[in-house]
Image (tube, grey):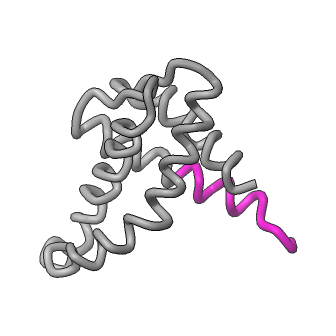
Amino acid sequence: MKWLINAAALFAAVRLVPGIQVRGTATLFAAALAVGLLNTFLRPIISLLALPVTLLTLGLFTLVVNGFIFALAAWFVPGFAVAGFGSAVGGALVFSLVSFLLNLLIRPGR
């Protein structure tokens, strides 16, 4: 279910943020899987290493970390392209918001 939510959130980011492209449905699902795996395994490590900068910027550096993870997923998945850093941060922001809202709506055990 989480994978489908990530795919829907990525679809929203592709539609709303200029500079993000996905070649097809299979690529969309592969990219959603890549973003999910990177968020699960790599993001906590990067967030811990960036903690001093995050504290100095009152949490705003988290947007940079999220954008980096989003761009890294685009680097790993052929057919998923992010034009630049601004698109990566915007895409990560839309991805996070849509994913959060869908998780609220489709909460297990509700």
Most extreme residue toward the right is 109
**Within the image, what quadrant is residue 51 found in?**
bottom left
Q: Residue at x 69, y 56 (%)?
A: 2
Viewer-proximal residue among 55 and 40 = 40
Percent position of residue 83, x then y: 28, 27
Magenta span covers which residues?
A: 97-110
Q: Residue at x 32, y 40 (%)?
A: 88
Would you say residue 49 sits in the magenta stretch? no
Percent position of residue 94, x then y: 46, 45
The reply, left or right, for residue 44 in relation to residue 33 is left
Q: Residue at x 58, y 20 (%)?
A: 24
Q: Residue at x 23, y 32 (%)?
A: 84
Quarter in which the C terminus is drawn = bottom right
Secondary structure mostly seen in the magenta stretch: helix
Viewer-proximal residue among 63 and 49 = 49
The reply, left or right, for residue 13 in relation to residue 104 is left
Where 80 sits versus 49, above or below? above
